[in-house]
Amino acid sequence: MQLCGGHGLMNQIYLRVHQICSGWRLVPNRPSVSAPLHGRALLERWKRPCAFTIHEWIKGLLAVPFVLHSQPTAVYQEHGENLVAIAADTHQRYAEIFRDVENLMRDHSTPLPRLTSAKFASLTQNNPVHHIKTGAPGKSKLNHLVPTVGSFFTPLPLEDAFKYQDSQRFISRRRFVAPSFNDIRLILNSAQLLGLFRTSGLDLVTFDGDVTLYDDGACLTDDNPVIPRLIRLLQQGRKIGIVTAAGYTEAPKYYERLKGLLDAVHSSDVLTPANRNGLVVMGGESNFLFRYDHTSPDKLTYVPREQWLLEEMHSWQESDITQLLDIAESSLRACAKNLNLPVAVLRKDRAVGVYPLDRTKVTREQWEETVLVVQNTVERSVVGTRLPFCAFNGTISQPLLVTHYRPD
């Protein structure tokens, strides 16, 4: 279990990290002009029946043309003319849906021109980014259709992104498997990349570690093909943040996991000192910040919390944090006993979780039950209303965590 802010607070932390890298002056409690770009989207925010996401809504829209045009029972040669014609028609229908959704998103939250933090804060003080195009009160049409939708900080050319992904994954040619959650996630990710590339508005890129930069539980070794790409981003003057749930409090542990990248940054002959200083590591889900340091044997140095904590985070009481972790730990132990889970409890500075003993297999359903038990218990507590937190299921080899990822 780990503590930090919700998604809005997370964006402000990333802006603070960017300022630590570049020397910008912070305008407190204002949204960033561009949302951080994660290497991997969070697929499962919460296991709640009411959590209807934009991904699921788009998936429902695409189900109609799939059912009407897929023709799964027809007998065709796989490369026959009829099948090609059906695929072309399905492609057109899918593209039209993404074009309509793109227009809804544009109306819902029109991206602002690239501004400095101060100008952005001044502009949005009395007129939030949400539905800013007309300054109209109330909800946008998209917000009525998908109540959980947030604001979009970058243009999202969904139609172009779909056409690209369709050329790679042949989504329109599938007759038995409808467009999936993963298809839509990749299309949304591609749309954000296209939007950033076309507007040249990318200053900070953040990546998760496991299952994004490297395999689950592995390390970023020097032969990883992502390293030259990260070096190129730094060379272009962009900042990179490695954001991970790993709650290590000392630099050597992060150096062990990120050794290939840190050594490459240290030895690179194309990076300037300013480029190298653009690399930071945020561990423990925004609890421990490290920045690149060429003088350190671990290539990282710890940044004290008082240098980057936001005003809201300064108000958190240590007694409340301890009480919240105590409640979560008690709930974890009770759930592990009830489900007869072969796990051990691990308590940290701002986290508590469980992990399997001797690599014993724990089923996904058991992990999810444990997540929901802890989430529900902490939400019902008094201290749970004062501190932001989140419960989520790590992978088989990872502990259960409670962190800042809470729906705002």
Image (cartoon, helix red, strand yellow):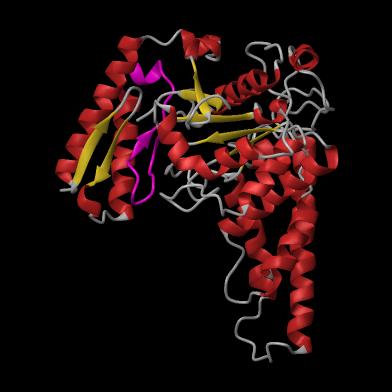
Whether residue 183 is situated above or below residue 240 in the rendered picture? below
Q: Determine which quarter of the picture holds residue 13.
A: top right
Magenta-tinted stretch = 381-402
Query: Which quadrant holds residue 249?
Result: top left
Residue 239 in the image: state x and y as whole percent: 68, 31
Does the magenta portion include 132?
no
Q: Nearer the viewer, residue 359 or 4?
A: 359
The location of residue 387, given as percent across then percent down, is 41, 18
Is residue 193 shown left or right of residue 340?
Answer: right
Left or right: 189 with respect to 115? left
Magenta span: helix, strand or loop, mainly?
loop
Question: Which residue is pictured at 35% across the width and 45% down the height?
Answer: 398
Q: Is residue 61 visible?
A: yes
Horizontal relation, residue 332 to residue 130: left or right: left
Q: Is residue 347 or residue 281 the one in the foreground?
A: 281
Taking 197 as reference, is 292 left or right?
left
Residue 161 versus residue 282: which sits nearer the camera?
282
When asked about the image quadrant of residue 76, the answer is bottom right
- The residue depicted at 60 percent of the width and 49 percent of the height is 55
- Number of numbered discs: 0
Visible in this render: residue 50?
no
Q: Is residue 324 above or below residue 397?
A: above
Q: Position of residue 66 (x, y in %)?
A: 66, 69
Quarter placement of the N terminus = top left
Residue 397 lies in the magenta stretch: yes
Q: In the displayed structure, would residue 198 be above or below residue 388?
A: below
